[in-house]
């Protein structure tokens, strides 16, 4: 049976930190399903289609990675995809409280679903989509933090291309 890990997030946009996590998860799981959240409480910089497109381009060379989007409860989406694993990355201390809260709530909602955390590789410990967007919006270099395609999309979005 294929063991699939569901990797949920906003991915606004996908970063090299996310990609590192996906490739490391593939050493443990047969397949990673990247699930882009449609969250009506957040106003993302990129549309859902743009975020999915950037992820698809970024994982082109990786085997056993699928990209999809979801709305509603994550645990329901996990079950619907015949999985019981939520994969998340943990960066510096600041992530812990939020992720802990989410994991406890998800466990309360569905005890069959397990949250698995991988420590973010040290190179990406202090980067986030948010900080990358801020630098890019002000014309700062973000080379090496996101795949070249995403870098180009950010430049276009902020009128630097
Ligand atoms: O990249 P993010 O924004 O930290 O991702 C957060 C995400 C999408 C994983 C989280 O908001 C989520 O799981 N949303 C779906 C709704 C849900 O099931 N929430 C948790 C229980 S209330």
Image (cartoon, rainbow, N blue to C red):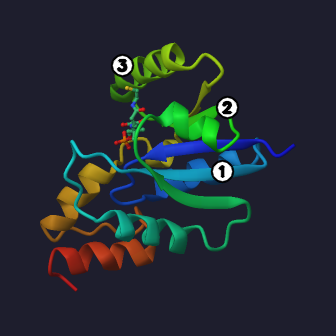
Q: Secondary structure at mark 3?
A: helix
Q: Secondary structure at mark 1?
A: strand
The CA distance from mark 1 to mark 2 is: 12 Å
Q: Residues within 10 Å of mark 2 (few under 14, many from 20)?
A: many
Q: Earlier in the sequence, mark 1 or mark 2?
A: 1
Judge left or right: residue 84 versus residue 135: right
Q: Secondary structure at mark 2?
A: loop
Q: Ligand 1 within 8 A of label 3's CB?
A: no
* Rendering coords of residue 22 (x, y %): 61, 51
Residue closer to the observer: 103 or 159: 103
51 in relation to 23, above or below: below
Give the residue at x 75% y 43%.
29
Q: Earlier in the sequence, mark 3 or mark 2?
A: 2
Give the residue at x 42% y 23%.
102
Residue 13 image-quadrant placement: bottom left
Query: Which quadrant of the frame does ligand 1 lie within?
Result: top left
In this view, the mark in front (3 or 2): 2
82 in relation to 107, above or below: below
Residue 81 image-quadrant placement: top right
- The residue that label 1 is drawn on is 32
The CA distance from mark 3 to mark 2 is: 22 Å
- The residue that label 2 is drawn on is 84
- The residue that label 3 is drawn on is 97
């Amino acid at each position: 049976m294929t063991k699939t890990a569901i990797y949920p997030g906003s991915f606004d946009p996908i970063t090299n930190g996310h990609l590192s996590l996906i490739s490391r998860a593939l050493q443990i799981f047969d397949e990673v399903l990247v699930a882009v959240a449609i969250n009506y409480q957040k106003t993302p910089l990129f549309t859902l289609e743009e975020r999915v497109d950037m992820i698809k381009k970024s994982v082109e060379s990786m085997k056993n990675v699928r990209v999809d989007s979801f709305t509603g409860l994550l645990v329901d989406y996990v079950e619907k995809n015949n999985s019981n694993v939520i994969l998340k990355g943990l960066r510096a201390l600041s992530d812990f409280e939020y992720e802990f809260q989410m994991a406890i709530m998800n466990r309360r909602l569905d005890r069959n679903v397990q949250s698995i955390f991988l420590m973010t590789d040290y190179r990406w410990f202090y980067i986030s989509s948010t900080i990358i967007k801020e630098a890019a919006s002000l014309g700062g270099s973000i080379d090496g933090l996101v795949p070249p395609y995403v870098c180009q999309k950010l430049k276009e979005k902020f009128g630097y291309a």
